[in-house]
Image (cartoon, rainbow, N blue to C red):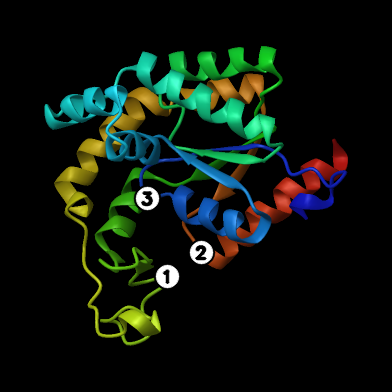
């Protein structure tokens, strides 16, 4: 199991195309093992919510339809990871790094004794991503994610959460096929090259993510546990 290695949970980095299931697997590991899930999107939203100077700057960048620069993103990640390291809290990186420059910045934090123990690569083809995301649904209230093939709501219409049982699950705007193709193009251009980088610089766990979610989760936990036991 993940926590079998000297009672220390390894720090994890999740890689994979949009729709590979990174967020869903990470969320379950947070629930089961007490990880902190670090998402750059969440960090941006928190800065904006707190109305910090940086948050206002991020808001203007996003409103203009632009990407937040590496400098801003890296500093937010560094600040958060230093705080987690001080608390001895294990973390999962989801959605960062997205570029090789970000990966190299993350590597530089090893000088502060902050490091990634394992990279989890959730493998899926572009065609499978399109099929999966076109069938993905979400509860607009509790944000629970469903898949009409692998993990549908019980009645195929409403959220299973008893407090939201009359809420119909919906398709997110960014799960439109044309939007998906654009996201895949960005991923294949910017983020996919990180796979080769981490295969040379880290211990990588590869999981077939185009299967039932429970299998993806159990195989991920098993693979990380085996690496821990042998490390």
| CA gap, disc 1 and disc 2 | 7 Å
Residues at marks 3 and 2 touching, judged by CB atoms closer than 8 Å: no
Nearer-N-terminus badge (3/2): 3
Q: Nearer the viewer, residue 142 or 24?
A: 142
Q: Nearer the viewer, residue 154 or 74?
A: 74
The residue singled out by tag 3 in the image is 19
Neighbours of disc 1 within 10 Å: few (<14), some (14-19), many (20+): some
Q: Give SS at disc 1.
A: loop
Nearer-N-terminus badge (1/3): 3
Residues at marks 1 and 2 touching, judged by CB atoms closer than 8 Å: yes
Q: Give SS at disc 3.
A: loop
Coordinates of residue 34 in the picture (x, y in percent): 65, 53
Q: Is residue 108 left or right of residue 57?
A: right
Above/below status of 93 relative to 124: above
Residue at image location 25% in from the left, 59% down from the top: 134
Above/below status of 193 relative to 118: above
Coordinates of residue 5 in the picture (x, y in percent): 84, 45
| CA gap, disc 1 and disc 3 | 13 Å
- Mark carried by residue 213: 2
Neighbours of disc 2 within 10 Å: few (<14), some (14-19), many (20+): some
Coordinates of residue 205 in the picture (x, y in percent): 64, 40
Q: Nearer the viewer, residue 208 or 57?
A: 57
Coordinates of residue 27 in the picture (x, y in percent): 51, 55
Above/below status of 191 relative to 37: above
Q: Quadrant of residue 56?
A: top left
């Amino acid at each position: 199991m993940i926590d079998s290695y000297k009672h220390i949970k390894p720090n994890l980095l999740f890689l994979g195309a949009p729709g590979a299931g990174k967020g869903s697997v990470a969320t379950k590991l947070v629930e089961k093992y007490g990880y902190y899930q670090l998402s750059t999107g969440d960090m941006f939203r928190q800065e904006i919510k707190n109305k910090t100077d940086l948050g206002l700057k991020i808001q203007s960048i996003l409103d203009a339809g632009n990407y937040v620069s590496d400098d801003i993103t890296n500093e937010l990640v560094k600040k958060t990871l230093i705080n987690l390291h001080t608390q001895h809290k294990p973390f999962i990186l989801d959605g960062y790094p997205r570029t090789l420059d970000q990966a190299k910045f993350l590597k530089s934090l090893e000088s502060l004794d902050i490091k990634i123990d394992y990279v989890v690569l959730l493998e899926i083809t572009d065609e499978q991503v399109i099929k999966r995301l076109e069938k993905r649904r979400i509860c607009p209230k509790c944000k629970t994610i469903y898949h009409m093939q692998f993990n549908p709501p019980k009645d195929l219409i409403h959220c299973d959460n008893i407090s939201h049982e009359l809420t119909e699950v919906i398709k997110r705007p960014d799960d439109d096929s044309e939007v998906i193709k654009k996201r895949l193009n960005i991923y294949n251009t910017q983020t996919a090259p990180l796979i080769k980088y981490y295969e040379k610089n880290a211990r990588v766990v590869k999981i077939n993510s185009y299967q039932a979610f429970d299998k993806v989760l159990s195989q991920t936990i098993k693979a990380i546990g085996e690496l821990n036991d042998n490390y």
